[in-house]
Amino acid sequence: MLDAVVVGAGPNGLTAAVELARRGFSVALFEAKDTVGGGARTEELTLPGFRHDPCSAAHPLAVSSPAFRALPLERHGLEWLHPELPMAHPFPDGTAAVLSRSVAETAASFGPRDAGAYRRLVTPFLPRWDTLVGDFMSLPLTALPRDPVTLARFGLVGLPPSTWLTRRFRDERARTLFAGLVAHVMAPLSGFATSAIGLVFALAAHTRGWPVARGGSQALSDALAGYLRELGGTVHTDYEVKRLDDLPPARAYVFDTSPTALARIAGFGDHYARYRYGPGVFKIDYALDGPVPWTAPEARTAGTVQIGADSAEIGAALRAASREDRAPDAPFLITVQPSVVDPTRAPAGKHVFWVYGHVPHGWTGDLTDAIERQLERFAPGFRDRVLARATAGPPELAARNANYVGGDIATGAVSGLQTLLRPKLSLSPYTTPHSAVFICSQATPPGPGVHGMPGHNAAKAVWRRLRQT
């Protein structure tokens, strides 16, 4: 009998399997698709030689993750590449605010009226970033914070809505960039703890950057799988699990799935009936004949580029995606241009480009024209560079990855108390009604993103149980 079976080979399932194998437990991992990766894959979606990331592409949380930093992933082929600028946010007048590794450069891009306010916001947390991120992402209620004072200070700043935090800025440039940071998790700007979301992304840029993985996000997943095999774990792909009986006997079962899928597979009925899924996204991967012709020079060297004219436009796009049955007329866009720093992603002189906009949950329309109108506002002539495009709305994203219910790439709404208390109110969020069944997806704390911490935290809960039996 195996000690543990893990279902789902996304970053969290892979991390849970690795953490258990590192502690000497026998582990088998089962994945429904033909490759590991989940939200961290790389595929030729458009033309031969153009390697795209169907979901995650830039990795500010992965490079800062306590789970990943403790593993020898570089030995298994992972290499982080850092663009000249982590992120740029261009404006219609051809200028841009930036999120640089340098706090001073970032503050200067906001203008003299807000430079000091930004420095005062981030500077207290920078020296303690590694400790803070460990405390912030650790297993709830079972690990004492190593720096409770800094964590408490972060909570005072981060728990209010981002609209409160941005009141300290006097001009629109800083407000707009920060609104874009919050929108990475599709949360309304006025939501609970949205200040923390924006602040985490900013601090991550200043401390460890917003890199891409050489060769694509698949490199991270392959490194985790390679380390798991080195530890004696086994990986089974093309293996869809529809019920617990489909799996071999084990002392524990760990699911990197949505709560809905887990309830169906394990027969939990309506245990997660109150769990809410959030807005979806419409994703386009482009093969380009040259670099994106951004008007703002800063955007040409940035790995990630946010697109939204001002904070009001971003807020309206988020509200429309959250509450309406049609997509925003001017969608907020997150774009990544990996080939500005990684020439392996496209043929010589060509580029890959990654973009998505927010849409309502389960939306079935086509956002291509609206996305390209937005891009043309800030990069005139963009359409002329397009060689091919691959589009995916909520139905296609859910078909590619069952965790993305209704196109929700966060596997659950990041709003209200569910921002922190997910998948339901519980002192032990990784356990389930069955004592041998656990959940480790991004539907559990600390939530969405490629950082492996739900898998890391769930593994702790699993090995505590295994030691008791």
Image (cartoon, rainbow, N blue to C red):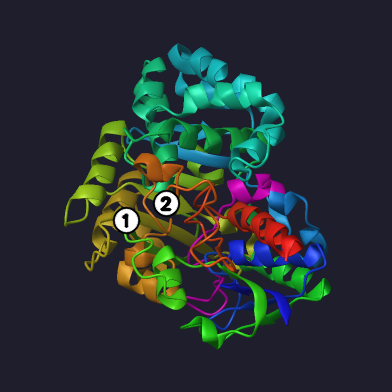
Q: Is residue 325 above or below residue 215?
A: above
Q: Position of residue 365 (x, y in %)?
A: 21, 66
Mark 1 touching mark 2, by CB under 8 A? yes
Asked where in the image residue 456 lies, by quadrant, the reply is: bottom right
Mark drawn on residue 162: none
Please give the residue where the numbered disc 2 appears in the rendered image. Answer: 424
For label 1, the residue is 274
Range shown magenta: 42-66
- The percent position of residue 72, horizontal first and vertical second, equals 81, 58
Point 71% across, 36% down: residue:
130
Quarter-wise, where is residue 215 in the image?
bottom right
Q: Observer-nearest residue: 457 or 189?
A: 457
Say if the magenta span includes residue 356.
Answer: no
Looking at the image, which is closer to me, 58 or 155?
A: 155
Type of amino acid at the residue the image marks with label 1: Arg
Q: Residue 61's spot in the image, x, y percent?
A: 60, 47
Which residue shows up at 53% across the image and 20% down it? 121
